Image: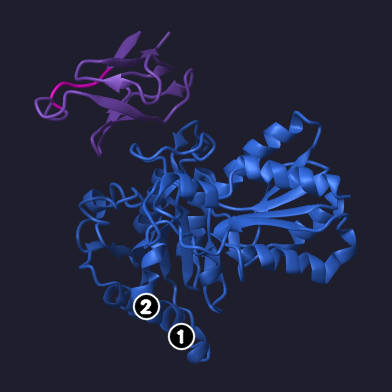
């Protein structure tokens, strides 16, 4: 059964969790303010009322403790969804994430699975300063053992969350605050989407072509998909047809779709709201260079946060974040550079 | 045709008389059933769900981000 409901991303996530909780008693949620408050970015809204305090557990502000507990629960047969309120807070609990969650399957010779979802809020653009505004896609993708998901819209968010809960590996589910559709934070029009009532999964490692074009390929994810779409609209007015690849998952990474698109367009621009150096943008470009350098008609380009903390000052923050204007400019330069 | 009204007493209007339409969950012109959550209202940072009072074709009288008070008609449902 399909639906004509248009859900914001936050409700799509909470609906996916609710449906899996109804179907599987081993699924539960814990984290700071996920219960009575419903998650500060709305990802667990309504769950406490339906499932109660045993399955939707408010924790103390002790990320090391409750993420470590999540790993233990996952290894003991449960399927926890643990919320790290801001991705930026990983600093206090990284041992639990990358030495325990990410590696315990390997350390145990495959005898233990860690079917845990670590759900976390990412992104800036709303003047929340350097410890509440990072995306950190590359930080988690760099570590072997974690899957990394970052949806751009509500349809993908529900399908990816359902897949994440059913996955036997630890999954970082990284949702962008500015896509959640919260009443107090503006989100782009395309973030809310028609979402089917029934449960469904979107397989990891399958990027989506969200706009087809022949002149240049923009590879991106999460919030930047919307900026890229806005840039593509402006460029279409100049006769430049941009193809946009929404990666949807960083790990596993759908290099094939990227390579196929670049083979068609000959030009590659990668856009990420993460730091520029040592990250996703470089990985995408290296992947194309290794496999099919000859397909590039002009040097690849990348837009990301220059290697500075995200500024609190609004003009300074807006300056460091990639935007539609900068993306359009990079595409034009790439096309002229042929 | 049935009005979709922001109910009285949803929040303490003495503290803050106004809210906004935070989200419409169905497009203008969509078919809805009675009881479907069609919109949410935000007052400060709290949100309140608004249900369709009848089945039919939904019309938005007030767009997203429009200001509401208790008793404001935000839309209609036309059962034909």
Q: Which mark is residue A71?
A: 2
Residue drawn at point x = 48 percent, y = 68 percent: A171
Q: Considering the numbered disc 1 on the image, is that residue within a helix, a strand or a loop?
A: helix
Q: Which chain does purple denote in the image?
A: B
Query: In the image, which residues are magenta?
Result: B5-9
Is A256 placed left or right of B22 in the picture?
right
Q: Please, is residue A292 above or below residue A242 in the view?
A: below
Which residue is more in the foreground, B31 or A222?
A222
Residue B30 inside the magenta-drawn segment: no
Q: Residue B9 carries which label?
A: none
Q: Residue A104 carries which label?
A: 1
Q: Where is residue A47 in the image (x, y as percent from the top left)?
A: 28, 51
- Tag 2, which chain? A
Q: Magenta span: helix, strand or loop, mainly?
A: loop
Q: In which quarter of the image is residue A97?
A: bottom left
Residue A77 visible in image? no
Q: Do the CB atoms of the residues marked 2 and 1 lie less than 8 Å apart?
A: yes
Q: Please, is residue A159 above or below residue A78 in the view?
A: above
Is A48 placed left or right of A129 in the picture?
left
Q: Position of residue A77 (x, y in %)?
A: 37, 77
Residue B8 inside the magenta-drawn segment: yes
Q: Quadrant of residue A335?
A: top right
Is A169 placed left or right of A130 in the picture?
right
Instruction: Identify the colour scheme used.
Output: by chain
- Please tell me the colour of chain A: blue
Residue drawn at point x = 78 percent, y = 46 percent: A333
- Tag 1, which chain? A
Which residue is more in the foreground, A77 or B39?
B39
């Amino acid at each position: 059964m399909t639906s004509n409901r248009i859900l914001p991303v936050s409700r799509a996530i909470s609906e996916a969790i609710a449906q899996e909780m109804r179907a599987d008693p081993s699924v539960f949620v814990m984290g700071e303010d996920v219960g009575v408050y419903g998650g500060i970015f709305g990802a667990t809204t309504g769950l406490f009322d339906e499932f109660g305090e045993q399955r939707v557990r408010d924790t103390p502000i002790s990320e090391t403790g409750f993420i470590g507990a999540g790993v233990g629960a996952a290894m003991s047969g449960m399927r926890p969804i643990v919320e790290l309120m801001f991705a930026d807070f990983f600093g206090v609990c990284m041992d639990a994430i990358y030495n325990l969650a990410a590696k315990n399957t390997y350390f145990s010779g495959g005898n233990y699975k860690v079917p845990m979802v670590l759900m976390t809020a990412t992104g800036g653009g709303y003047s929340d300063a350097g410890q509440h505004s990072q995306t950190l896609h590359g930080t988690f993708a760099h570590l072997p053992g974690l899957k990394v998901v970052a949806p751009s819209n509500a349809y993908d968010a529900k399908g990816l969350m359902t897949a994440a809960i059913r996955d036997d590996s630890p999954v970082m589910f990284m949702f962008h605050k500015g896509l959640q559709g919260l009443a107090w934070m503006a989100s782009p029009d395309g973030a809310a989407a028609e979402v089917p009532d029934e449960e469904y999964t979107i397989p990891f490692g399958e990027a989506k072509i969200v706009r087809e074009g022949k002149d240049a390929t923009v590879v991106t994810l999460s919030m930047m998909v919307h900026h890229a779409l806005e840039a593509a609209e402006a460029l279409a007015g100049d006769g430049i047809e941009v193809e946009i690849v929404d990666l949807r998952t960083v790990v596993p990474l759908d290099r094939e779709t990227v390579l196929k698109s670049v083979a068609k367009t000959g030009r590659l621009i990668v856009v990420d709201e993460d730091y520029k150096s040592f990250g996703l943008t470089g990985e995408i470009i290296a992947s194309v260079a290794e496999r099919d350098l000859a397909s590039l008609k002009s040097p690849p380009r990348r837009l990301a946060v220059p290697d500075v903390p995200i500024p609190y000052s609004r003009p300074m923050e807006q300056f460091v974040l990639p935007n539609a204007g900068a993306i359009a400019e990079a595409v034009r330069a790439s096309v002229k550079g042929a | 045709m049935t009005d979709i009204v922001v109910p009285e007493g949803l929040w303490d209007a003495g503290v803050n008389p106004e809210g906004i339409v935070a989200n419409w969950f169905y497009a203008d012109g969509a078919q809805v059933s009675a009881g479907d959550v069609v919109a949410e209202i935000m007052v400060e940072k709290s949100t309140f769900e608004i249900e369709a009072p009848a089945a039919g074709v939904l019309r938005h009288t007030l767009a997203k981000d429009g200001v509401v008070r208790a008793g404001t008609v935000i839309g209609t449902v036309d059962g034909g």
